[in-house]
């Protein structure tokens, strides 16, 4: 993480003086879930499982926890060395990918719709979506589905979108 921070010139004066930590910002992470970890203690504001409908957060793949760590890990376990880019932000975790890290368009859209319906409740300002869809999935998706996604992308910053082709 330290190497990446150096590459992107992360250590500006505002970061060094701890002016920019993500505090007061809530980020929705749509991925494989989140494992319980001390680096996220007290900052998981919400959870939705669009795959198995479990009530408590978990990550049966590890990718979602990895992404959340890059974004929001406090660095507590590494004495700050492996802190994320925004270690003070709150997280809303939406599981849209299964244990293989795979999904279909319907589960991804269900997660996006859940965020759309709950972004005010959790004050979500940023959405991270680490998923893509194959060409056939895109052809099979309802062509009108994109309209609901477009209707709220202006209200939330969306990062991490990967739509091949």
Image: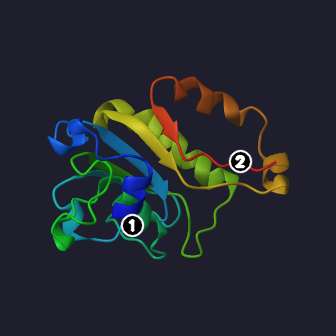
The answer to whether residue 58 shows anywhere in this view is yes
In percent of the image, x 30 and y 40: which residue is there? 26
- Say which of 105 and 66 sits in front: 66
In x, y percent, where is residue 58? 37, 70
* Residue that badge 2 annotates: 163
In percent of the image, x 19 and y 72: which residue is there? 77
In percent of the image, x 59 and y 75: which residue is there? 100
- Say which of 21 and 119 sits in front: 21
On screen, residue 14 above or below 84: above
Residue 134: image quadrant is bottom right
Q: What element carries label 1?
A: helix
- Say which of 100 and 72 sits in front: 72
Residue 8 - label? none
The answer to whether residue 33 shows anywhere in this view is no
Q: Quadrant of the N terminus?
A: bottom left
On screen, residue 75 above or below 115: below
Mark 2 is surrounded, within 10 Å at the Cα level, by few (under 14), some (14 to 19) or many (20 or more) other residues, namely few
Residue 125: image quadrant is top left
* Residue that badge 1 annotates: 65
């Amino acid at each position: 993480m330290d190497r990446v921070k150096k590459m992107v010139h992360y250590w500006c004066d505002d970061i060094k003086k701890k002016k920019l930590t993500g505090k007061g910002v809530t980020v929705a992470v749509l991925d494989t879930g989140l494992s319980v970890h001390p680096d996220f203690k007290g900052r998981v504001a919400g959870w939705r499982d669009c795959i198995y409908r479990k009530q408590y957060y978990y990550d049966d793949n590890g990718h979602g926890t990895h992404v959340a760590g890059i974004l929001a890990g406090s660095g507590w376990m590494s004495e700050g060395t492996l802190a994320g880019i925004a270690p003070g932000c709150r997280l809303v975790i939406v599981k849209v990918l299964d244990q293989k890290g795979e999904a279909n368009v319907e589960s991804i859209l269900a997660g996006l719709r859940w965020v759309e319906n709950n972004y005010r409740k959790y004050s979500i300002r940023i959405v991270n979506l680490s998923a893509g869809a194959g060409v056939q999935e895109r052809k099979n998706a309802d062509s009108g589905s994109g309209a609901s996604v477009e209707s709220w992308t202006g209200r939330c910053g969306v990062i991490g979108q990967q739509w091949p082709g």
